[in-house]
Image (cartoon, grey):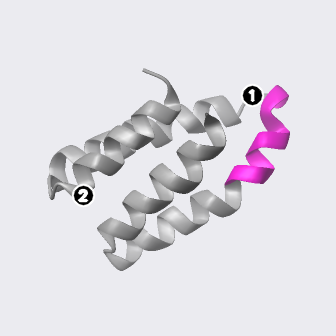
Amino acid sequence: MSVAERLVHAAHELRRGHAAAGARAVEEALGELGRLLAQPANAGAARVLLPRLEEALAAQQRGDWIGLADALEHRLAALLE
């Protein structure tokens, strides 16, 4: 499964109200995304994605699961496809 697909899967779990499954899926997707962005060849992509990641993390900190799902699926995953 690609990073974009993992982000969409996480978003769907969050929208269904499956908090535990959604949290695991978010952790897995963002972990994989972090590994990809840590590669020097992806520095440009990291600069583009950082504001979207910050938006997703802000939604998570607010407990806004729908906002987090939207940020994952419509902002982050959309950029990766």
On screen, residue 71 above or below 21: below
Q: Which mark is residue 12?
A: none
**Badges 1 and 2: C-beta atoms under 8 Å apart?**
no
Q: Is residue 11 magenta?
A: no
Amino acid, disc 2: Arg
Q: Residue at x 82, y 30 (%)?
A: 40
Amino acid, disc 1: Gln
Mark 2 highlights which residue? 15
What is the secondary structure assignment of the residue under circle 2? helix
The magenta segment is: 40-49
Q: Residues within 10 Å of mark 2 (few under 14, many from 20)?
A: some
Question: Residue 25 is drawn in which quadrant?
Answer: top left
Q: Is residue 29 found left or right of 37 in the rendered image?
A: left
Q: CA distance from mark 1 to mark 2?
A: 31 Å
Q: Is residue 44 found left or right of 46 in the rendered image?
A: right
Mark 1 highlights which residue? 39
